[in-house]
Image: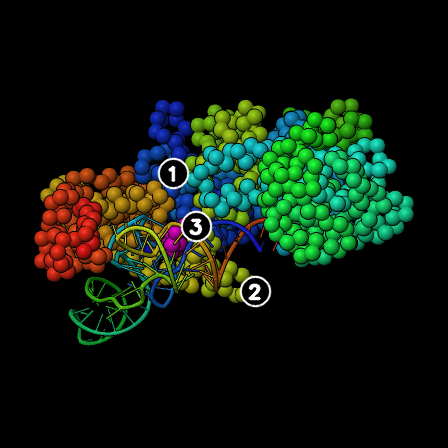
RNA sequence: GCCCCCGUAGCCCAAUGGCAGAGGCAAACCCCUUAAAAGGGUUGCGGUGCGGGUUCGAAUCCCGCCGGGGGCACCA
């Protein structure tokens, strides 16, 4: 093999890696190396790996291999998120079992990963659809249930009419199903929930620990959690004994409340509507129920509503205000009812204008009367028409009114969150059965731990077709069981868990994949965790990444993990697009990863992805040239191949200029990798390659030890991105029988980083007029004198300069 | 509508207060070659989207626009 032949290298080295198994994490207690845990979001086995996978796994592999080279004990595992709808749909179509499709795809992907040369510890491989895995979902569910963190409730839920299942709030994106894009509708169903809202404040507070997460990711989570401060206020409603509570962030505007609105779908509306208004209300409620989320949430939609015939009493001034039902008030936020202050809230104002309700200004903002302009004034100002609050600022008024309300027992300051509990039941088959047995006498009874796992019954093909209830319901033998408590006849819960449950803790399972005493061995988890570097897409900002944070906190509270955040550092890779657009079948602009590898080789494809730009940026394949990457690799390979000095030779006598170039490269590349600037690091390697090329062709020649030093440095550094080329180059350099992946990261010699002279730029009025070669440790005074003495500079000066700025040793700026 | 990020050469991108250009693509030219390919080399007056400001000095900081991308959007 004297030519650079990527396919031949792949065949050779893939086999050698199988034998060497170089990326096994060590659990040896005597191994005192510092541990590092790097993890990619595990793939869903939907087919073979695609370009997006190529990108993420190339990025995470740079981090992993870098840490291996630096001598850390690295954990870099792989597994599959193998429960989920596509398998089920494929099974229905082919009249097969979902497992057949799933496990065949997993094998395909595993083979592709091996070819792609990713530095995984294959011994820890897991699949969430294995009973050995999902039994621990059930075990964890039982723990959550015991702690009151898993509960069942009825209510309106998001329903995807295409996938025929409910969805969590997080899975509804702009009113559409996150998976399939269908318009989501609302249905009244009793479902299981995880009480993530109990952790809302901590999810918010602990973001302080996540300072190395991308800012936009944190913003998305913060918005999603949606904390607001305000007050609960009790309003008496005529004809009802119990007062009705509302939540408001503007209790200071309480005197400006001119009407009261109850969510149309709230039980309260139905309860308090008068007989006279009931027919109109029923019609309205039915209309609202028909609307999809998209229609209901459309901002430019006209306000709608209906008068309920009742009046509420403003607790601070005794005013009677009419009670309306409307769909702009949400039944599941706050208390499902609001006080409306049209002067200072645009939504309330829109409603007031539509139904000709009064508008009362209570904050003097200096802006025109909202009642006339139709523009609410939510800003700051002095309170007016507000009795004891008159003259106060917003902040003062809020504090004072809360005091007043609390003294009277009419209300209190409080905090609210936008975050809702996590709906986890799914009416589909290919997931973890919820380990609950419904007994007519005992109620909801968890399946005892020792009887776990509750495995899926054998069902295939048509039996899995969506019919709005879980397919498991028709597996009669499976459903009918004895109650674990009273042994009476009972039925299993027939829903399965959201697959986001599976992915909320898989990274913990990797730490002790064969563990049988629990979901993971706490000792191992606390040694490896939390993950030092997690890599995956931003699309999981309020899904997987939020759920995993929640799970980790619960496990922490259970005493099972010592940390409260699972991912110390997070990197969101960009997407791979083509011709400015996401790749898609309908556009016909798809690029096949396997084909690219066939054409250019693994290393060239990986290099192209890494070199394209910063890892978090989208990369457009149409702008890139894997052919050029391959050319560079061939060039680097030839340098390594042509080295003529023996391995182990001392570099001391080598060509100084090249030695310095090598050590500067080491220094810079190390810093660049530490700050995740992989594309720039690659550029540095290209420079070093050129420097070595020149040294061979027109410098000291291939036998100079400095050329070996440069080539060996190149091999080690290149191994992060182009492992095959690096391995072969390393072997050609005379290092046989091992792997370059464990060669060790080079360390720059400070003596070789010192430059003997630096070019100092001399500016006059900001324009470069001269350049001086000076010592790097030249003093400011010396440099100033040198600069002023320059003839070129003198030509641009007339008399004494007004000011001289000296930034030794690189710059002098003279202001004439 | 509100908030955030980004606009540097034909293209992808470096430079984060100090000479606008590190690296790559494309292009042109040269060497090598009978020739071509491969290989080696040389070539960068665009002044950083536009307009102001701060500063001795601005791609970088501030303000306002324009363009692109993203997030949120009846959450009271």
Residue at 81 percent of width and 27 percent of height:
A441
Residue A201 percent coordinates (x, y)? 58, 33
> Do the residues marked 3 and 2 share a common chain?
yes
Residue A390, numbered label: none
The reply, left or right, for residue A559 in relation to residue A65 is: right
Q: Callout 3: residue from which chain?
A: A
> Label 2, on which residue?
A586
Disc 3 element = loop
Residues at marks 1 and 2, CA–CA distance in whole angstroms: 40 Å
> Do the residues marked 1 and 2 share a common chain?
yes
Depth check, mark 1 against mark 3: the one in front is 3
Residue at 84 percent of width and 32 percent of height:
A241
> Label 3, on which residue?
A616
> Label 1, on which residue?
A23
Residue A777 percent coordinates (x, y)? 15, 42
Q: Is residue A434 above or below residue A176?
A: above
Q: First in sequence: mark 1 or mark 3?
A: 1
Q: Callout 1: residue from which chain?
A: A
Residues at marks 1 and 3, CA–CA distance in whole angstroms: 26 Å
> Would residue A609 be counted in the magenta stretch?
yes
The reply, left or right, for residue A98 in relation to residue A668 is: right
Disc 2 element = loop
Give the residues drawn in magenta, as a range.
Answer: A605-616
Residue A388 percent coordinates (x, y)? 68, 34
Which image quarter is the N terminus of chain A in?
Answer: bottom left
Q: Is residue A766 visible?
A: yes
């Amino acid at each position: 093999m004297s030519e650079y032949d990527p396919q031949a290298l792949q065949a050779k080295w893939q086999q050698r890696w199988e034998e060497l198994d170089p990326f096994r994490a060590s659990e040896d207690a005597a191994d005192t190396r510092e541990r590092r845990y790097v993890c990619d979001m595990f793939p869903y086995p939907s087919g073979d790996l695609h370009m997006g996978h190529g990108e993420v796994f190339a990025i995470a592999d740079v981090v992993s291999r870098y840490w291996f080279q630096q001598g850390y004990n690295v954990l870099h595992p792989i597994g599959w998120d193998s429960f989920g709808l596509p398998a089920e749909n494929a099974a229905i179509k082919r009249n097969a079992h979902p497992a057949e499709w799933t496990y065949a795809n997993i094998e395909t992907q595993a083979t592709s990963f091996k070819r792609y040369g990713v530095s995984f510890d294959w011994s820890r491989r897991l699949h969430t659809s294995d009973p050995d895995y999902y039994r621990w979902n059930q075990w964890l569910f039982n723990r959550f249930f015991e702690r009151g963190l898993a509960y069942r409730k009825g209510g309106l839920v998001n329903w995807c009419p295409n996938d025929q299942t409910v969805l969590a709030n997080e899975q509804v994106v702009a009113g559409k199903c996150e998976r399939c894009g269908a318009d989501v509708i609302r249905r009244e169903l009793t479902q299981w929930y995880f009480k993530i809202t109990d952790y809302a404040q901590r999810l918010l507070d602990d973001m302080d620990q996540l300072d190395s997460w991308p800012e936009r990711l944190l913003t998305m989570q913060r918005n999603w959690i949606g904390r607001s401060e305000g007050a609960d206020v009790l309003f008496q409603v005529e004809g009802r004994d119990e007062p009705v509570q509302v939540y408001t962030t503007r209790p200071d505007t309480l005197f400006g409340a001119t009407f009261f609105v109850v969510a149309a779908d709230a039980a309260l509306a139905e309860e308090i509507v008068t007989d006279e208004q009931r027919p109109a209300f029923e019609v309205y409620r039915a209309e609202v129920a028909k609307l999809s989320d998209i229609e209901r949430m459309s901002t430019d939609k006209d306000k709608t509503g209906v008068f309920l015939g009742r009046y509420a009493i403003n607790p601070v001034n005794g005013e009677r205000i009419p009670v309306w039902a409307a769909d702009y008030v949400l039944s599941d936020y706050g208390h499902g009812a609001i006080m409306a202050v049209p002067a200072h809230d645009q939504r309330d104002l829109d409603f007031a204008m539509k139904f000709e309700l009064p508008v009362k200004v209570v904050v003097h903002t200096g802006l025109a009367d909202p009642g006339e302009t139709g523009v609410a004034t939510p800003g700051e100002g002095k309170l007016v028409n507000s009795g004891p609050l008159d003259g106060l600022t917003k902040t003062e008024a809020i504090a004072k009114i809360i005091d007043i309300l609390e003294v009277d027992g009419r209300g209190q300051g409080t905090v609210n969150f936008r975050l809702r509990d996590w709906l986890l039941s799914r009416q589909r088959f290919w997931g973890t059965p919820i380990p609950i047995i419904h007994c007519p006498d005992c109620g909801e009874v968890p399946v005892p731990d020792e009887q776990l796992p509750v495995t899926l019954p054998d069902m295939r093909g048509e039996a899995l077709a969506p019919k709005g209830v879980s397919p498991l319901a028709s597996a009669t033998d499976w459903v009918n069981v004895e109650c674990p408590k009273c042994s009476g006849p009972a039925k299993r819960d027939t829903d399965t868990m959201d697959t986001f449950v599976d992915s909320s803790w898989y990274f913990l399972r990797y730490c002790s994949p064969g563990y049988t005493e629990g979901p993971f061995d706490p000792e191992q988890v606390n040694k490896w965790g939390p993950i030092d570097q997690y890599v995956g897409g931003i699309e999981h900002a309020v899904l997987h990444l939020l759920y995993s944070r929640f799970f980790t906190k619960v496990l922490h509270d259970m005493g099972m993990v010592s940390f409260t955040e699972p991912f110390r550092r997070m990197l969101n890779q960009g997407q791979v697009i083509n011709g400015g657009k996401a790749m898609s079948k309908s556009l016909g602009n798809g690029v096949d990863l396997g084909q690219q590898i066939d054409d250019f080789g693994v290393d060239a494809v990986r290099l192209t992805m890494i070199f394209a730009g910063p890892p978090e940026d989208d990369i457009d394949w149409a702008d890139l040239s894997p052919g050029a990457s391959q050319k560079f690799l061939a060039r680097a390979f030839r340098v390594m191949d042509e080295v003529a000095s023996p391995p182990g030779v001392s570099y001391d006598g080598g060509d100084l200029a090249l030695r310095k170039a090598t050590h500067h490269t080491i220094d810079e590349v190390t810093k660049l990798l530490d700050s995740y600037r992989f594309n720039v690091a690659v550029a540095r390697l290209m420079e070093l390659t050129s420097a070595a090329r020149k040294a061979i062709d027109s410098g000291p020649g291939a036998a100079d030890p400095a050329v070996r030093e440069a080539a060996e440095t190149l091999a080690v550094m290149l191994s992060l991105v182009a492992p095959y080329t690096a391995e072969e180059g390393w072997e050609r350099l005379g290092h046989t029988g091992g792997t370059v992946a464990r060669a060790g990261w080079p360390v720059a010699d400070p003596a070789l980083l010192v430059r003997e002279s630096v070019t100092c730029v001399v500016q006059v009025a900001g324009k470069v007029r001269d350049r001086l070669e000076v010592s790097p440790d030249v003093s400011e005074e010396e440099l100033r004198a040198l600069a002023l003495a320059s003839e070129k500079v003198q030509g641009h000066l007339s008399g004494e300069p007004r000011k001289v700025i000296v930034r030794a040793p690189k710059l002098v700026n003279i202001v004439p």
